[in-house]
Amino acid sequence: MELEAIVVLIALFVLALFLGVELITKVPPTLHTPLMSGTNAISGITLVGALLAAGADASSTWVNFLGFLAVFMASVNVIGGYMVTNRMLAMFKRRD
């Protein structure tokens, strides 16, 4: 990969990081849990992409390791999203 491409990717990552921090800090605390649980549950799309990356025919062990790591992290994210959503919805159930 060329040096210019790496610099562009790093700059894009830093801009996305700053934008994410600004957006998250502007969300009121009452909306934070519903929004985060919803976006974590929707990020199952990330899991599909991670599975494609892990299953790619790459001769490099490094690529396979990063694909496995992506699958693991995406799975934790999706499961955590469903757990938070379930816990949040349980707060609104009637107690008999």
Image (cartoon, rainbow, N blue to C red):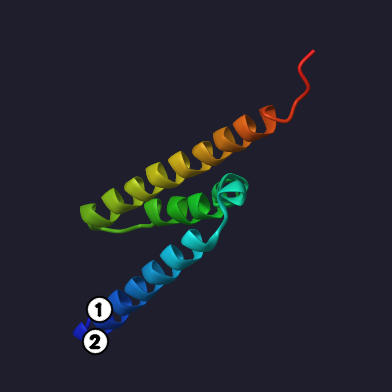
Q: Give the crowd class for mark 1: few <14, some 14-19, many >=20 residues within 10 Å.
A: few
**Which residue sits at x=22%, y=83%?**
2
> Where does the image place residue 29, in percent across and percent down from the top left?
55, 49
Q: What label sits on residue 52 in the rendered view?
A: none
Quadrant the N terminus occupies: bottom left
Q: Point out residue 96 in the picture as x, y percentages from the top left corner.
A: 80, 12
Q: Nearer the viewer, residue 60 or 39?
A: 39
Q: Residue at x 28, y 75 (%)?
A: 10
Give, as a three-letter code, the residue at label 2. Glu
Name the kind of residue labelled 1 in the image. Answer: Ile
Residue 37's image quarter?
A: top right
**16 to 94, vertically: above or below:** below
Q: From the top left corner, tell me how far across and down residue 66 is, in percent.
A: 30, 53
Residue 4: mark: 2
| Percent x, y of residue 76 | 44, 39
Please count the marks in the image: 2
Q: Residues within 10 Å of mark 2 (few under 14, many from 20)?
A: few
Decide: marks 1, 2 in contact (CB < 8 A)? yes
Q: Secondary structure at mark 2?
A: helix
| Horizontal relation, residue 59 to residue 32: left or right | left
Q: Name, please, the residue furthest toward the bottom.
A: 4
Residue extending farthest top: 96
Spatial separation of the CA atoms under disc 1 and disc 2: 5 Å
Circle 1 residue: 6
Viewer-nearest residue: 29 or 17 = 29
